[in-house]
Amino acid sequence: MGPLARASETRFTWDDYRTWPDGERWELIDGEAFAMSPSPGSKHQNVALQLAIMLELYFKGKPCRPFIAPLDVKLSEEDVVQPDLLVVCDPAQIKRTHIEGAPSLVVEILSPSTESHDRGRKLELYAKSGVAECWLVSPFPPYVEVLSLDGPSYRVWRVFQQDETLRGKLFPDLELKLPEVFDFPLEPEELALLHPKPLKRA
């Protein structure tokens, strides 16, 4: 999803946000509104679907529960976000309309138009709000960066490549086979980047 700042100097709150049309998707960060761009691409949705299925299977029968966007997460009166996926371990946080407070885990699926936003404003907000673990998932080139909260900010715990099995720090027995997550067709130019032709000798 590609966030674009709303053309307004007004600072908004959760109460303001709740009055906006249902058909529009917004996030609030420090009271500033960001409109979410048109629907994500097929790779983004493929990755989100596969991760959601795997997380649902892993957490079935356990206290924690996974959710997938769009779902509002209210981190404060001026901070409302919609992570691509999230895991909540405190049932009291699960409200009828939203999640109240920081999830235990959030997953953001990156794209060229969102990466600076996700790595900047949103990561700072997640850290400030106490989200214990954050995954940044790149559909192409395919990898997953696992970030662990260390004091006021995140540190990179591990980076998993597309042929590896992801193991998070927060849930150490969780294992996700990334070849299945990144199982989608690539464009010719993407294949060329992954498998460049050898240079011909003169």
Image (cartoon, rainbow, N blue to C red):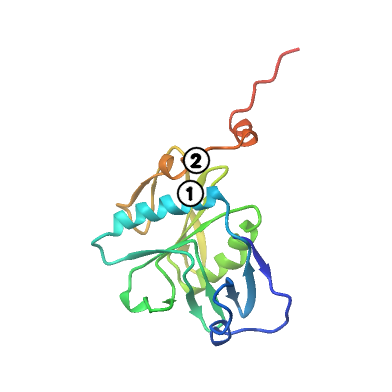
Q: Residue at x 35, y 52 (%)?
A: 54
Mark 1 belongs to which amino acid? Asn
Residue that protrudes farthest toward the top in the picture: 202
First reached walking from the N terminus: tag 1 or tag 2: 1
41 vs 136, nearest the viewer: 41
Indicate the quadrant where residue 32 lies. bottom right
Instruction: Residue 157: tell me if it is visible.
Output: no
Q: Mark 1, residues whose alpha carbon is within 10 Å: few (<14), some, or many (≥20)?
A: some
Q: Residue at x 33, y 57 (%)?
A: 56
User: Residue 64: horizontal and vertical position, in percent?
Assistant: 31, 66
In the image, residue 47 above or below residue 103: above
Residue that protrudes farthest toward the bottom in the picture: 15
Q: Residue at x 43, y 39 (%)?
A: 179
Residue that protrudes farthest toward the left in the picture: 61
Q: Residue at x 36, y 53 (%)?
A: 53
Q: Look at mark 1 in the image and give the residue it sits on.
A: 46
Q: Look at mark 2 in the image and give the residue it sits on.
A: 184
Question: Mark 1: which secondary structure?
Answer: helix
Which quadrant does the N terminus fall into? bottom right
Instruction: Say whether residue 181 is left or right of residue 55.
Output: right
44 vs 155, nearest the viewer: 44
Indicate the quadrant where residue 130 lies. bottom left
Instruction: Say whether residue 88 is left or right of residue 128.
Output: left
Mark 2 belongs to which amino acid? Phe
User: Residue 23: horizontal and vertical position, in percent?
Assistant: 56, 72
Distance Cα–Cα, label 1 vs label 2: 7 Å
In the image, residue 144 above or below residue 35: above
User: Residue 131: horizontal and vertical position, in percent?
Assistant: 45, 68
Instruction: Residue 173: tell me if it is visible.
Output: yes
Tag 1 near tag 2, CB within 8 Å: yes
